[in-house]
Image (tube, grey):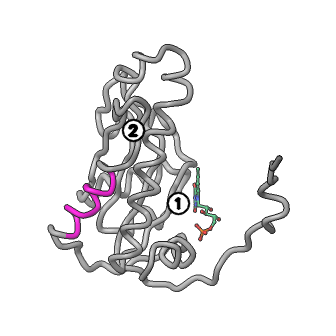
């Protein structure tokens, strides 16, 4: 698949098979996280890969009872690292660290899709509950929860706004 096709065909998947994810595929997901761009190449991000069923269920509850989170064999909790981002002052901690982790997450969603996996970016969750569950230190801010697994659904594409409402061409 070419890259644009992967981008176009990726869908949020909210139903998963129990089939485990092979180690070499996990390595590819980690490479996708690693190679995302970041402000000043500071890479102010950190990821928890959660396989434990009990903790996955608790993460699903912390994600406002989005039960599909627990169904995936892997749940990635993506965090922004304040301690690293502080190098750039307020802009670092308010903006860059979130962008750094977001770039990694998007890379992972695309690689997951290219490898036949499904995933969904989950942003609705109680940060402090997630922090407590994984004993996440203060300098990390949980920014996204991403369940990953082989898909058990094939959703239709969701609509996108037309190009005319998305882009303004500025030419001389
Ligand atoms: C920042 C962010 C937060 C999101 N939070 C949730 C969420 O809490 N639960 C959920 O089911 N989907 C969530 N999504 C997924 C979106 O609903 C989904 O990307 C959107 O509807 C477009 O569908 P598609 O991903 O299939 O193209 C989130 C996506 C983003 C980027």
The vertical placement of 12 against 106, above or below, is below
Residue at mark 2: 79
Q: Is residue 36 magenta?
A: no
Residue 171: x and y in percent read: 81, 50
Q: Which mark is residue 35?
A: none
Cβ of mark 1 under 8 Å from ligand 1: the answer is yes
| x then y, percent, for residue 34 | 29, 48
Q: Quadrant of residue 54?
A: bottom left
Above or below, 53 relative to 25: above
Residue 167 percent coordinates (x, y): 77, 56
Residue positioned 48% across, 40% down in the render: 143
In what quadrant does ligand 1 lie? bottom right
Over which residues does the magenta segment extend?
Answer: 25-33
Instruction: In the displayed orientation, state which residue is furthest to the left.
Output: 23
Of the residues tagged 1 and 2, which is closer to the observer?
Answer: 2
Q: Give 152 or 28, whichever is nearer the viewer.
A: 28
Q: Which residue is mark 1?
A: 66
């Amino acid at each position: 698949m070419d890259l644009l096709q992967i981008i176009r065909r990726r869908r949020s998947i909210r139903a998963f098979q129990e089939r485990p994810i092979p180690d070499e595929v996990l390595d590819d997901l980690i490479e996708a996280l690693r190679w995302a761009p970041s402000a000043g190449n500071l890479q102010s991000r950190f990821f928890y890969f959660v396989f434990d069923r009990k903790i996955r269920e608790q993460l699903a509850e912390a994600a406002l009872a989005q039960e599909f989170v627990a169904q995936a064999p892997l749940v990635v909790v993506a965090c922004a690292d304040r301690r690293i981002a502080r190098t750039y002052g307020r802009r670092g901690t308010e903006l860059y660290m979130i962008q750094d982790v977001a770039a990694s997450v998007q890379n992972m969603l695309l690689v997951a899709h290219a490898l036949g996996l499904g995933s969904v970016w989950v942003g609705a969750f109680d940060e402090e509950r997630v922090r407590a569950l994984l004993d996440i230190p203060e300098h990390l801010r949980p920014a996204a929860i991403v369940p990953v697994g082989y898909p058990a659904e094939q959703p239709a594409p969701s609509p996108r706004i037309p190009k005319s409402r998305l882009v303004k061409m500025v030419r001389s």
